[in-house]
Amino acid sequence: MSRVRTRTPVLDPACADAVDLARSAVEENVRPDEVGGHLGAQSEGERVVTHYFACLDRAYTGWRWAVTVARASRARNVTVSEVVLVPGEGALLPPQWVPWSERLRPGDLGVGDLLPTAADDVRLAPGFTDTGEETDREMFFEYGLGRARVLSPVGRDRAVRRWHAGEAGPHTPIAHAAPAQCSTCGFYWPLAGALGATFGVCTNEFAPDDGRVVAADHGCGAHSEAAVTPPQVEPTAPILDELAYDITEHLAEELPGADRGGSVDDAAAEPLGHS
């Protein structure tokens, strides 16, 4: 196996001595007190050298000024090619760039936003791979209503794991406190297709998951068979107990009808508070 030899660029003496030229190039763009000491020089190629200076700006701690100087062949004059600010050891750097498709989170999509789907998205498969028995394919394709892509096995498995581990799964406090599972609830409507054995939709308007997909082993306190509603008896009018007191003349004077010539017994026969 042959070894490839690489030639290390030789530090050009004229370019290496152009420290003052490189410093003045930086000071022309920033304040002089923001340029620190010379940190060294590095050869970038034939007659090309980069000088490094410390950056004293507190907003760029750990960064360095890099000034690249060069000279033409057989020329004595050195010129400045580039002045940049580069990070050094311990420099504060922004986080690594992440594509927007990987930064997207559930709930980020707003009104009017469009979310493009990649052509090679593994969650989708060509529409002709759909094998659902309830699909009337002849009618759909006759009217041009066939879907271009459908859910792939990968997309289905991801949805199953996401839903089962989410708030509508069995591992939540409300599911642990439920009297029974959703699969035994009268308000549980199973999904069609392969997901019907594991998931359904809650149709109880008083349940916290009404109108949402829930796991068959999920549960809540609004289960249809959680408890039997006790019979409600309509309240009746209060009954006056006349045996708990004696009718006296003083009471007879206050009873209605006593001052109209009625007897005490007749007046007592009328209920109190009735005129």
Image: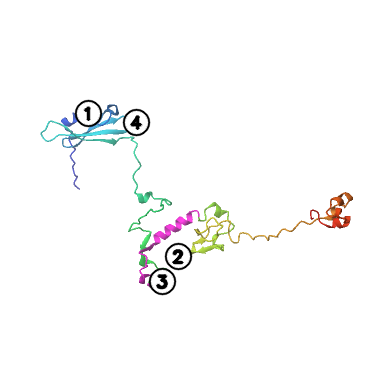
Residue 251 on image: x %, y %: 86, 50
Front-lying residue, 208 or 123? 208
Mark 2 lies on residue? 194
Mark 3 lies on residue? 136
Instruction: For the residues labelled 4 and 2, say whether their Cβ atoms are less than 8 Å apart.
Output: no
Instruction: For the residues labelled 4 and 3, say whether their Cβ atoms are less than 8 Å apart.
Output: no
Q: Is residue 22 left or right of residue 63?
A: left
Mark 4 lies on residue? 58
Q: Please give the range of residues in magenta.
A: 138-167
The residue positioned 27% from the left and 27% from the top of the image is 32
Residue 98 on image: x %, y %: 35, 47
Front-lying residue, 63 or 250? 250
Residue 118 on image: x %, y %: 33, 57
Please state which amino acid type lies under the numbered disc 4.
Arg
Q: Secondary structure at mark 2?
A: helix
Q: Earlier in the sequence, mark 3 or mark 1?
A: 1
Q: Residues within 10 Å of mark 4 (few under 14, many from 20)?
A: few
Q: Which corner quadrant of the image does residue 117 belong to?
A: bottom left
Q: Is residue 142 magenta?
A: yes
Please state which amino acid type lies under the numbered disc 3.
Asp
Residue 131 on image: x %, y %: 40, 68
